[in-house]
């Protein structure tokens, strides 16, 4: 009984602490705040206080970010037991294995983890998508080829006619040597990529299409032509991706408690390395395998200038307006 009373007093005190801020909101925004899970409320208040101007900056945008933070935390918490199971029971079986000959990319597929509306999808996301799916692949060559023990990528598949048919997908690629020692860095990356894609879920169709213009690409499909620098720029410097990549970087910077530019530079290095490997591989192939129209058209210097000068400046300028409390900007 004594314990219950102490918990009740603590609950009442937390509500009183929140009330100091929430009373300044409109009735509509008050309802949004009180419907946030506890993690979301704490994120909003902590973030608001870090600006030094409580009472002025608790806007709808901050509330949305609180919802996205809470959803990201909920999803990644649900996934960690599965990731730990992969480490202890699955990955050791693939040590010294050759690439999977049945898969065009040599990958081994494990059971995906799905969270659907009404079946594990955070309530904060139910008006943005009908499911969040996390796929896990074992890539026995990833460390040898890139030096990475894991890589994470994602996509928000938007239905332009109705968000109820949209969904989020996160792909994790694990080397067999991936272990519990890698979990901290993996969790930081997973959180960053997840909130990046959730951020897309909050964007309008007009903004989303800046990163996915649905224009013909001679390499195949309807997307940017990454064989040309304007195609690389068209994607990474688009309104949709500037918004989501700065959110991802801000999330990771807070996780590591490091300056925003430091985390951004690591991400930009990943982009640069990825496109350099792609360029070197495609341009080294025989002309019959890769005809001239399919060869990469930019130099290493041009790629470097784009990522580390042009794009870096653009992301930091955006972060200054949206996340002025971020360290180092």
Image (spheres, rainbow, N blue to C red):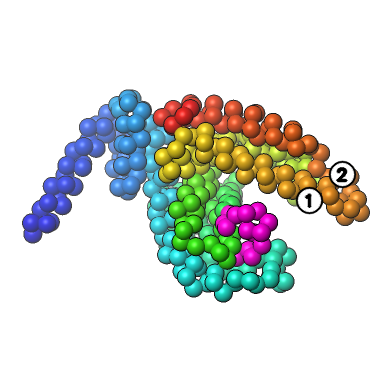
Dot label at residue 293: 2
Q: Residues within 10 Å of mark 1 (few under 14, many from 20)?
A: few
Residue at 60% x, 65% y is 138
Q: Which residue is mark 1?
A: 281
- Where is residue 227, by image quadrant? top right
The span shown in magenta is: 137-151
Residue 118 in view = no
Q: Taking 65 as reference, is 273 left or right?
A: right
Q: Secondary structure at mark 1?
A: helix
Query: How far from the left and from the top, in percent, is residue 242?
Result: 58, 35
Q: Nearer the viewer, residue 162 or 40?
A: 40
**Which quadrant is home to the N terminus?**
bottom left
Label 1 to label 2: alpha-carbon separation: 15 Å
Residue at 73% x, 48% y is 277
Residue at 79% x, 37% y is 298
Q: Nearer the viewer, residue 164 or 288?
A: 288
């Amino acid at each position: 009984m004594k314990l219950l009373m102490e918990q009740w007093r603590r609950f009442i005190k937390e509500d009183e602490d929140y009330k100091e801020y929430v009373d300044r909101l409109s009735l509509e925004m008050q309802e949004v705040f009180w419907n946030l899970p506890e993690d979301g409320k704490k994120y909003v208040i902590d973030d608001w206080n870090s600006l030094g101007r409580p009472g002025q900056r608790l806007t709808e945008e901050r509330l949305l970010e609180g919802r996205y933070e809470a959803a990201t935390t909920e999803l990644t918490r649900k996934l960690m037991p599965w990731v730990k199971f992969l480490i202890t029971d699955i990955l050791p079986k693939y040590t010294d294995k050759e690439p999977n000959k049945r898969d065009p990319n040599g990958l081994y597929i494990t059971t995906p983890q799905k969270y659907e509306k009404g079946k594990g999808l955070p309530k904060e996301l139910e008006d943005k998508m009908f499911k969040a799916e996390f796929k896990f692949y074992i890539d026995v060559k990833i460390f040898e080829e890139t030096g990475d023990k894991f890589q994470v990528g994602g996509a928000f598949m938007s239905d332009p006619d109705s968000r109820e048919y949209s969904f989020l997908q996160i792909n994790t690629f694990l080397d067999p040597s991936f272990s519990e020692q890698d979990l901290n860095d993996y969790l930081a990356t997973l959180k960053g990529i997840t909130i990046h894609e959730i951020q897309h879920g909050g964007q309008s169709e007009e903004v989303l299409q800046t990163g996915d213009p649905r224009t013909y690409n001679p390499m195949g499909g309807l997307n940017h032509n990454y064989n040309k620098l304007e195609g690389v720029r068209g994607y990474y410097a688009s309104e949709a991706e500037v918004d989501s990549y700065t959110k991802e970087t801000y999330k990771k910077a807070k996780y590591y408690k490091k300056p925003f530019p430091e985390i951004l530079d690591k991400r930009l290095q990943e982009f640069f390395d990825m496109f350099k490997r792609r360029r070197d591989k495609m341009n080294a192939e025989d002309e019959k395998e890769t005809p001239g129209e399919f060869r990469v058209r930019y130099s290493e210097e041009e790629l470097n200038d784009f990522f580390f000068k042009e794009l870096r400046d653009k992301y930091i300028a955006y972060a200054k307006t949206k996340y002025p409390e971020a360290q180092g900007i």
